Amino acid sequence: MATKRRGEDAARVLSYGDVLLRVQDVVLLEGPEWLNDQIVSFWFEYLDEEHVAAAAARRGPEAASARASILLLPPATTFLLMHGADMAAEVLAPLKPASRGLVLFAVNDNTDPSRAAGGSHWSLLAYHRPSNTLRHYDSSPGSGNEPNARRLAAAVGPALAGRSSPAPLLVQVGAMPRQVNGHDCGVYVLAMARALCEWWVEEAAGKAGAAAGKAEGEGPEVQVVEGEAGVEEEEARWVAREAGLGEWLTARYVRLMRAKVRELIGAKAESRGD
Amino acid sequence: MEETGNNDPVKKEGQGQVISLVVKDQTGNEVHFKVKMKTRLEKVFNAYCNKKGVDTNSVRFLFDGTRVNGSSTPEELGMEDGDCIDCVIEQVGGC
């Protein structure tokens, strides 16, 4: 009986990119369960493969390059970076960190690399190159993920910023909405990751549009700051977007999102006949 | 087809080149494997988990910082002799 149930839990649901989802992973989305790294990995892969690509395509060829400048690191890689700080540069190197403008890390609070299925909290750390900041989006700031984010930031900061820039500043994003229960932090990470990718594509499209306007000399209403926009201005625009988070990233949104991700996996599994 | 001559160079070539891979966990322990270029890495992962006595679903494998799907082969991933695969444990979180 026990073996049979284990067999069912381990049944394959969907093989997507580098992620193989099993029944035991997908059921986590059904109830008020904690999410594991498999679900987060799937979502990051999906965002990169489909969501961002589609968003960029909608906004024209200028935004297409925005996709290549986003790097979504699966939680397993992040965990490796966090607990092997000395080799962070080496692990990141093949992923071309210097060519990325937005790098997302799902941070887990497990501090013991020998304990499987450890951890109790997820948060999202994002490197935003235009402002050279590492921004921590934590739906439960009291849960103690701040030291973990700090640790990760110290490990990856220098490799991300490159030799020419100072190590990025770690910013705790105060506008991040708080979770209202004890099980949704993972979903906040999924929602936030999608939002950041969309913002990035929008910003890229906006800049490309402004640059094109300047090139064609279309009217004085197109204002382009000489050279690159200032760091403060870039950060201010990002902060303005963050300030609006409370308006849409609500408990209800998160609850619906959990169901939507579940449906997405189901639809993909069905269409592939797995 | 019942040949047992392992030293036959023609047959050896037909089986594909053999490389050695290292699977390294986060405590720094290493396990070495000899693998054919066309072998699905799943087999390496299963062997590793058996040796370590861990559930295959509780660990993830990374090559050059990217997750490795067990259905891919060293050839597909461009692995070379002596390459290292990192092994990372499962993580969960909710509150």
Image (cartoon, coloured by chain):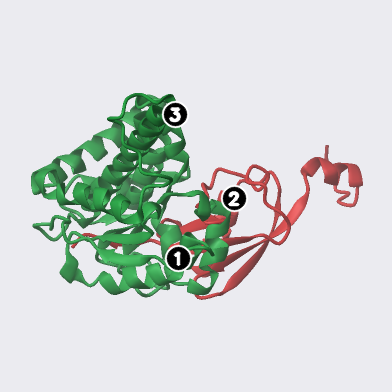
Residue B60: x and y, percent?
A: 46, 57
Q: How crowded is the residue under tag 3: few (<14 C-alpha within 10 Å), some, or many (20+)? A: few
Question: Would you name the residue on which mark 3 appears?
Answer: A215
Q: Work out how far the residue at label 2 is from the one at label 3, CA to CA, in angstroms.
A: 51 Å
Label 1 with label 3: CB-CB less than 8 Å: no
Identified at 26% across, 50% down, the residue is: A238
Q: Work out how far the residue at label 1 is from the one at label 3, CA to CA, in angstroms.
A: 37 Å
Depth-wise, is mark 2 or mark 3 nearer the camera? 3
Depth-wise, is mark 1 or mark 2 nearer the camera? 1
Chain letter, disc 2 residue: B
Amino acid type shown at disc 1: Val
The letter of the red chain is: B
Residue B11: x and y, percent?
A: 85, 43
Question: Would you name the residue on which mark 2 appears?
Answer: B41
Q: Is residue A155 above or below residue A256?
A: below
The letter of the green chain is: A
Label 2 with label 3: CB-CB less than 8 Å: no
Q: How crowded is the residue under tag 1: few (<14 C-alpha within 10 Å), some, or many (20+)? A: many
Asked whether the residues under marks 1 and 2 belong to the same chain, the reply is no
Which residue is most to the front? A220
* Mark 3: secondary structure: helix
Amino acid type shown at disc 3: Ala
Identified at 49% across, 71% down, the residue is: B26
- In depth, the one of B8 and A15 nearer the eye is A15
- Mark 1 vs 3, N-terminal side: 1
